[in-house]
Amino acid sequence: MASSSSLGSAKALGCSHASLLAPQTQRTVVAPAPSRRSSVRMRPSAAAELAEPKKTVWVWTESRQVMTAAVERGWSTFLFGSKDLGKDWSSTARINPLFIDGPEIFNGENQKVAVISQVSSPSELDLVQPDNAEAENIVIDFRGGWQVIPAENIVAAFQGCKGTVLAVSTNSTEAQVFPEALEQGLDGVVLKVDEMDDIIKLKDYFDRRNEAKSQLPLTKATVSKVEVVGMGDRVCVYLCSIMRPGEGLLVGSYARGMFLVHSECLETNYIASRPFRVNAGPVHEYVIVTGGKTSYLSELGSGKEVIVVDQNGLWRTAIVGRVKIESRPLILVEAKDNSGDDTYSIFLQNAETVALITPDTGSGGRTAIPVTSLKVGDEVLVRKQGGARHTVIEIQEFIVEK
């Protein structure tokens, strides 16, 4: 890798100067405003806030197996120190070769597309500034042990810029640091590896992040039964993330139909808001996790990943901080879809803080209905799925659940 250099002045990045060592203007994360009502309206911008640009991945390798694995996963930009190797690989695969020459990177037409800066000290970090960039793309090689804080400083300094800032990573675990710095993350990574496993793991990581933030189809279901039953061991799921009004977990007694259970983000006269918690139901119930799988609520624990879904079906991943299982009185809720052919079931704790999310019904509509206020005829949101599961994976087979 080239040595650090003070990058010449240019305005390709289109943003104003910001010193990386000076205090940065931080983005404020605002928790949902307290409410004394049991049902609230989701902010119109909440769904849009979840979307984020797709991250860029360049691969720097001399392994043809790594090249093949990367191309199969949609990554086609490769860095080469040798033009002969780049030309050889370009003759056998459809790739975008870039060539390293000292502290600069060129494309096949010998046009400069990026500059490289090595950062191993605060003084070298201070040279990497928007006003000092002489190419639209900047590749940073962090050396000296520190990665997270320098990456956060760069994210803060380059926010709003048109260019792309990537960081060199020598393994898939290290590569995950940079897309998450200051939540927004750097624009991408240069994965410098010779092991195919690193390509596979990094792609799996991006799949879990669901960078496209796709939507899950949700459907309306009409409540057909509300019945107070006996005691059961219910599970509260504490996430490492804040949930907004209108967000929750998909939970159900049957995998074929999962109810959208609201978080406890609403504040009442009797209990403070807990926007990181979902009172999800008893131990036997399914919850949707990453990878298109389900898990029993009893199987969740610290470090597990679940998906948080909002009223519009937009979803994101979240890490479970802990779970708490306690014996509590339960209520049974059954609902039918609009066709009337399928009935879905869920047990929940019989408490005012536990609620099901409703369809978006306009500015006067309710986002969630507490189970203590739920009645036959109310509409709630469910996620319809294939019915059969074997070790949490959906399969096609004959099955009857009731």
Image (spheres, rainbow, N blue to C red):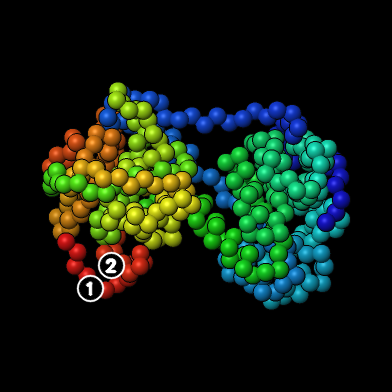
Q: Residue furthest front?
A: 327
Tag 1, which secondary structure? Answer: loop
* Mark drawn on residue 398: 1
Residue 130 appears in view: yes
Q: 156 or 325: which is nearer to us?
A: 325
Q: x, y percentage for residue 151? A: 69, 43
Q: Are marks 1 and 2 in contact (CB under 8 Å)?
A: yes
Tell me which label, 1 or 2, sits earlier in the chain.
2
Residue 316 appears in view: no
Q: Quadrant of the C terminus?
A: bottom left
**Residue at position x 82%, y 72% in the image:** 84
**Residue at position x 42%, y 39% in the image:** 276
Query: Dot 1 surroundings within 10 Å: few (below 14), some, or many (20 or more)?
Result: few
- Seen in the picture, residue 167 relative to 93 is either above or below; the reply is above
**Residue at position x 35%, y 39% in the image:** 263
Q: x, y percentage for residue 260? A: 30, 46
Q: x, y percentage for residue 186? A: 65, 45
Which amino acid is tagged 1?
A: Phe
Q: Which residue is mark 2?
A: 388
Q: Is residue 229 left or right of residue 140?
A: left
